[in-house]
Image (cartoon, rainbow, N blue to C red):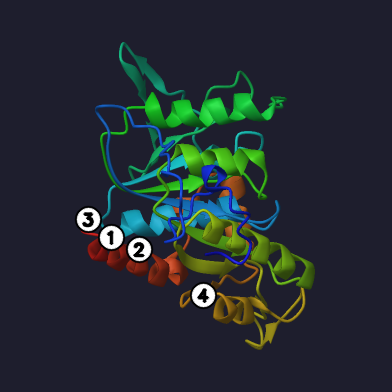
Amino acid sequence: MSESCNHDCSSCSSNCEQRTAEQTDFHEKPHEKSNIKKVIGIVSGKGGVGKSLVTSLLAVQAKKNGHQTAILDADITGPSIPKSFGIKERPLGMDDGMLPVKSALGIKLISLNLLLENDTDPVVWRGPVIAGAVKQFWTDVIWEDVDFMFVDMPPGTGDVPLTVFQTLPIDGIVVVASPQELVGMIVEKAVKMANMMNIPIIAIVENMSYFKCPDCGKEHHIFGESRIDFIAEKFDIDTVCKLPIDPNFAAATDKGEIEKVDSSILNKIIEKIGRFCVSHGV
């Protein structure tokens, strides 16, 4: 039984031995023409830590490793995935659903920004409408065969992320953080939320971890010393990746050329996802 258990099994996703109420599965089924093997959520306790960048880089590296890869942009009010890939093409509507767009490497993408008249138009929607849009991206899009689907989750631990967790069958998550102590506290909230939802944490990525001087090669911790190893040890997470402050990432994102950058630094996470799939019979 969780230490935070309130004994209300009807609102709890944990499958502990003390459960007295049958666990209800609220997960929606994907489109009948979709065959999605594993769904990986990319989460953060707050916005602005580089969650969309990590989502894009993970999808690119997985594709380079030979996996059929897709991105579902569930960050409805801040959809930035299409810009990273330089995609402005609208999804093609069919009689029985919608086809995702494809990047230069063949990564399948769906995002609300691909459906707006202008990509700078704000999305001023309430939580239930946002959750409904994410659900439609899952149920109405014809994804066909996908090995790994990466879901760029809304930031935080509120109503919308909770609804996404309950709607999509998330198999595991990657937590994204930055080095500041405050963010270290916030990332613990995201980790604890995943534990409450009984979803495995695959890895933690610390973005903007350090800056490596191009002249002397010395690493400088611009935003303070990292606490990510401490958090990983505390929650028994064995895979940690530290992304540097790299102007190439920002330039590639602005140009829509994220697929051209070296994403091999995240390869150990892709390899762990692969092992995770094998251990779960995929």
Residue 80 visible in the snapshot = no
Disc 1 + disc 2, Cβ < 8 Å: yes
Q: CA distance from mark 3 to mark 2?
A: 11 Å
**As displayed, is residue 143 above or below residue 43?**
above
Q: Residues within 10 Å of mark 1 (few under 14, many from 20)?
A: some
Residue placed most toward the observer, 16 or 198: 16
Q: Residue at (25%, 66%) from the top-left corner? A: 279
Image position, residue 238 (x, y; %): 46, 78
**As displayed, is residue 202 above or below residue 53?**
below
**Rendered image: mark on residue 273:** 2
Q: CA distance from mark 2 to mark 4?
A: 13 Å
The amino acid sitting under disc 1 is Cys
N-term-proximal mark, 3 vs 2? 2
Image position, residue 173 (x, y; %): 48, 57
Disc 1 + disc 4, Cβ < 8 Å: no
Location of mark 1 (residue): 277
N-term-proximal mark, 1 vs 4? 4
